Amino acid sequence: MSIIFTENEKVFTLHTKASTYQMKVDQYGFLLHLYYGRRTEGCMDYLLHYADRGFSGNPYEAGKDRTYSLDVLPQELPSSGTGDYRSPAVIVKNRDGSYGCDLRYQTHRIIAGKYSLPGLPAVYADEEEAETLEVDLEDPVTKVRVTLYYGILPELDIITRSLRVTNRGEGKIYLEKIQSACLDWVWGDYDLITFYGRHAMERSLQRTPIAHGAQVIGSRRGTSSHQYNPMMIVADREAGEDTGSCWAMSFVYSGNFKGEAEKDQFQQVRVQLGLSDELFSYPLEEGEVFYAPEAVLTYSGQGLSRLSQNLHRCFRTHVCRGKYRDGVRPVLLNSWEAAYFDFTGEEIYQFAKEASKLGIEMLVLDDGWFGKRDDDFSGLGDWQVNEEKLGETLGHLIGRINGLGMKFGIWFEPEGINEDSELYRLHPDWVLAVPGRKPVRARYQLVLDFSRKDVVDYMFQEICKVLDQGNIEYIKWDMNRSLSDCFSRATKDQGRVMHDYVLGLYDLLERLVQRYPNLLLEGCSGGGGRFDAGMLYYSPQIWCSDNSDAIDRVKIQYGTSFGYPISAVGSHVSAVPNHQTGRVTPFKTRGIVAMAGTFGYEMDPRKLSEEEKQEMAEQIKTYHKYGDLIQNGLYFRLTDPFVREVGAWEFLSEDASQVLVSAVMLEIHGNMTVNYIRLKGLPQGCMYQDQESKQIYASDALMETGILLPVELGEYQSYQMHFVKVS
């Protein structure tokens, strides 16, 4: 049993393989958080401290006992209006206009298997793999009921959290804030690790001490954003890649979010993750129910590498779905950087013809194939094939490419719309826009109102019409702007629009993956602007960044690896000079960096030299050789590319029989220093052979001192070493 309830003490204990999570219903019915950390036994309520704290309020039932205050007690779901002045997880505006929600324990249920969330992505598991704890809390006055969900996947060291709010009272209420997970520590000095960035430079690591006051990350852009990723790590000050305690919280959601870390007046730490409370005021009529998106929690007592590996396994095998969940993805060529808007069907066929000779398995037709779409200014929203531009039907083009033995994929941006489009002229009321105001444009486009079912239904029909024209096996789903003017003509309650928009997006994606179960869907939002666990439920891979420069990608993919599996990282070899940075890097280096992901190409293969074509063909063979190891192996960060002059990473098979090490020199100097790369995770007392040099190394030496990288002249040299265990 991974869930234990001790009746006498009213204590819930949740066990995973290496961690324990514990909470208690106290004498007043409040659900207090006791412990989350290294697996242990016994009751941890001795950690609670009671004292008269002055300006900390006391619940009425406590009578003259001034030592009891929720202002200083760790809680599972802190709410406003209870005397806790720290940041609450729940704020409710009641039907009489008052704010407050006094939630007390009612009952609980322990259920085999993992709960699911209607209309929302969530971790899934069989009955043998997981257990669910449901805890009902209720406000005795307003009858607002909150059901807390805990999903325990013991073998993965994963605990998930979500909640359901039910308005069981009379009259309408508003949810003003909903955080899906809250962790309270009664003491400790911790760091907060977050991942900031911008378009074309996403997920840079930032590690700062959790100090007095509040540290907040989030998105108010309608997507999870390039600027902050919806994942946070709390770590002991001394925790590193291989040692120390650390905790991760990842939000399974693709819209606005808020993450908070706060150290209070008594050195206690509270960390929360959930929906953003800006532009959010969600109405619940009598009897209505609201489900909060899920948060995934994991703990590691062995440093950040193990923490990341826990998340990798969970997302790869219990969030991603479909035909391509476990299989190595086809190597693809995308037409965007090869042709942009300027192409014909014959030219696309010639791309495919040359690519097929080199071993590329899929041709993806990017933007420009529909409507009047020869630039950014027009056509978006008109998802009818421009046969005049192609010079043939889409079905005919697909058939010709399939005839080469290649798969065919296509680009969509269903959420965007140009004013210069037939759809806008027919339905100007379908966009998010504030009546009487000029809208905010981005990339010369507006956004369709996906909070409306009629808009989502229309878009589903239009996409299906395209997909049914031929054997389309892949979609790149793009979204190239942030949301603004978040006003829907379909509702009076504008505080629900941003969340309902995401629900509409999920509804459309779910319908597509159900109708086309063999479709490979790749998420994209200007690259990594919607790189989150929510999208992975529908698209097992996400375009990591619009920046395909190999040297920048070493850093972008480094930050991404803390929370997401390598199998999810869309990464391609692009032409040089790179279209985003102008940098020139060796073809070999671009290939090695792109192999830390799904692997593909962004270039016109006809423009390559014979030497480059030969190198491309060899890269594709290499990727197929190591594809399963890359996708399903244990991933280790061997260096920090923000600190070291070399970026290095490792893939280790689960049985430790083989290791693939990749390294890229990020800097070159006169009289260059020597770099050694220490391997990780190898069993002690074993021997490994380098498959190229045939030299044999002791595993302990590889981990203690490392492997020597050659010192070579020239910028951005790279190395790939494959070791096999021989004894």
Image: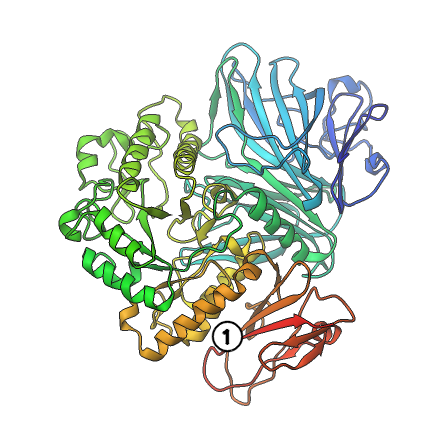
Residue 357 in view here: yes
Residue placed under numbered mark 1 in the picture: 666
The chosen color scheme is rainbow
Give whichever of 165, 412 is nearer the camera: 412
Residue 36 in view here: no
Crowding at label 1, few (<14), some or many (≥20) Cα neighbours within 10 Å? some
Left/right of residue 669 with respect to residue 335 in the rendered view: right
Q: Which residue occupies 51% across, 47% down?
A: 325
| Quadrant for the N terminus in the image | top right
Residue 255 at x, y = what percent? Answer: 45, 39
Instruction: State the image quarter where residue 651 is shown.
Output: bottom right
Residue 351 at x, y = what percent? Answer: 27, 63
Q: Which residue occupies 19% across, 44% down?
A: 371
Left/right of residue 422 with respect to residue 600 in the rendered view: left
Dot 1 amino acid type? Leu
Left/right of residue 178 with respect to residue 577 in the rendered view: right
Residue 31 at x, y = what percent? Answer: 73, 27
Q: Is 178 drawn above or below residue 226 in the view shown?
A: above
Q: Which residue occupies 40% across, 71% down?
A: 617
